[in-house]
Amino acid sequence: MERYIIVTTLCKDKKIAEGICDTLLIKNLVAGCQVSRVDSKYWWDGNLEMAHEYKLEFRTVESFFDMIKDEITELHDYEVPEISAIELRDANDEFLEWVSQNTVESYSDDEEEEEESDDGNDFGLL
């Protein structure tokens, strides 16, 4: 049985945050994304820093975490981004079904379409 998770990261640039959300949604790796502006304090290079950041939260399935982590790492604007996940527990069945329909099934359908249309072109073009 698939486990459901919330993946979290923080960005300093709103456009980067929106790009990460759009990429993960378009690839059907997440069912939804929430972006909130937050004030953060943290240690960096021995100094106590304060920054305005954008907190991203994604609803998804655990089996996609490594792919999501790779996409976030590629697009992120931090040298050391936080990419963490917590398990969703005791959620209502309708919500979990929505997550499944918009990740697992959608991603599987996209993979099948790519395999069916494989014409030997390794780049998926034409």
Image (cartoon, rainbow, N blue to C red):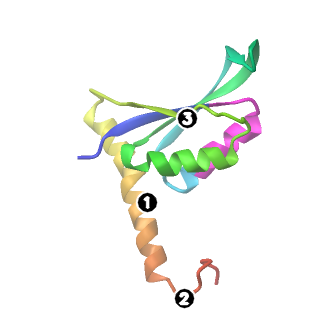
Q: Nearer the viewer, residue 46 or 18?
A: 46
Mark before the other along the chain sequence, 3 or 1 = 3
Horizontal side of residue 80 vs 68, given as left or right: right
Mark before the other along the chain sequence, 3 or 2 = 3
The spot of residue 83 in percent (x, y) is: 55, 35
* Residue lying at the far left of the rendered structure: 1
* Numbered-mark total: 3
Q: Residue at x 31, y 44 (%)?
A: 97
The spot of residue 15 in percent (x, y) is: 76, 39
Residue tagged 2: 120
Tell me which amino acid carries mark 3: Ile
Query: In the figure, 99 relative to 78: above or below?
Result: below
Q: Residue at x 64, y 80 (%)?
A: 125
Q: Residue at x 69, y 15 (%)?
A: 43
Tell me which amino acid carries mark 1: Tyr
Q: Residues within 10 Å of mark 3 (few under 14, many from 20)?
A: some
Mark pair 3, 2: CA separation: 35 Å
Tell me which amino acid carries mark 2: Gly
The spot of residue 10 in percent (x, y) is: 64, 29
Q: Nearer the viewer, mark 3 or mark 2?
A: 3
Residue 63 covered by magenta stretch: no
The spot of residue 73 in percent (x, y) is: 63, 45
Q: Residue at x 61, y 44 (%)?
A: 72
* Tag 3 secondary structure: loop
Mark before the other along the chain sequence, 1 or 2 = 1
Residue tagged 3: 83
Name the quarter where the C terminus is drawn. bottom right
* Span shown in magenta: 10-23
Residue tagged 1: 107
Residue 11 covered by magenta stretch: yes
Mark pair 1, 2: CA separation: 21 Å
